[in-house]
Every structure is written in structure tokens, then in C-alpha cells.
Amino acid sequence: MFTSYKQVILVRKDLKLPAGKLAAQVAHASVEAVHRSDKDMVKKWRAEGMKKVVLKVNDLKGLQEHNQRAKDLGIITALITDAGLTCVPPGTTTCLAIGPAKEEDIDEITGNLSML
């Protein structure tokens, strides 16, 4: 059976981040999660084209809940907190990367969320 891998990045829609800021925060989350991940998992994910999906959650509570669900399943996460140099106050948690991991495992956590 073929196993497929992906990474999902969740973004808070309540912050209404400008497009550039949102893109930077998503990139921070993706890179940080990859740095924390098992090298073999990253290698498999890269071999498949590094699938990434950006989804939205309502607020900080949504990020925290999905972060905990991923951790409970043993999936690497990266919760991103902004330095506050531009459009959000220092210490604002903006987004969450989950994985890379098996697609079916990530879907168990984020399958009910909508695309950004």
C-alpha cells in the first residue's frame, strides 16, 4: 500500500493578517516543523513533492486544540509566535504547522477544516 505524506499549516482567521505577513508566518511554521522532524520522514515527504496545505481556524483556541491533538498522536508541530515588529502585538501566536507526516494521520486532525 502506498503511503502519502503532507504538511498542514493552520492560520488564525481572526487576526486578518495582510497577505505578505500571512505568507511569512506560514513559511516560518513550515520551516520550523521540518527542522523538528525526523530526517527519514522529511526525505519521504520531499520525494513526493513536499505537499503542503494551508487551512484556517477561527482563533488561538483552535490552534491550541489542533496542536494538542497532533501531539497526542505523536506528530511534530510548530506553533509560531510573532515578534510583533509589524502588524500584531509581540507574542501573538499566528499559525501552526503539523507534520510532515502520513496524510491519513494529519487528516484525522484537520480533515474538518476549510482551505484558507
Image (spheres, grey):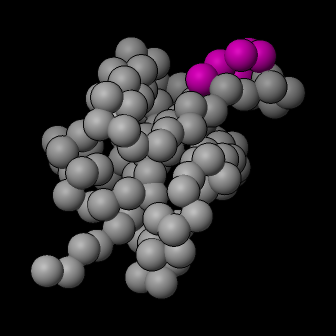
Q: Position of residue 115 (x, y in %)?
A: 32, 52
Label tally: 0
Closer-to-camera residue (32/43): 43
Residue name at image x 49 percent, y 39 percent? 77
Left or right: where 4 falls relative to 47:
left
The quadrant in which residue 61 appears is: top left
Q: Would residue 7 be visible to someone looking at this image? A: no
Q: Quadrant of the N terminus?
A: bottom left
- Spot the residue most to the right: 85
Residue name at image x 56 percent, y 52 percent? 37
Q: Position of residue 31 (x, y in %)?
A: 66, 54
Is residue 113 in the magenta section?
Answer: no
Q: Position of residue 74 (x, y in %)?
A: 36, 38
Dominant secondary structure of the residues highlighted in magenta in the image: loop
Is residue 89 in the magenta section?
Answer: yes
The quadrant in which residue 3 appears is: bottom left
Seen in the picture, residue 39 relative to 61 is either above or below; the reply is below
| Span colored in magenta | 88-93
Residue name at image x 53 percent, y 74 percent? 43
Left or right: where 7 falls relative to 43:
left
Left or right: where 80 falls relative to 99:
right
Closer-to-camera residue (45/80): 45
Q: Position of residue 96 (x, y in %)?
A: 50, 37
Left or right: where 69 falls relative to 24:
left
Seen in the picture, residue 98 relative to 79 is either above or below; the reply is below
Q: Would residue 43 be visible to someone looking at this image? A: yes
Residue name at image x 31 percent, y 29 percent? 72
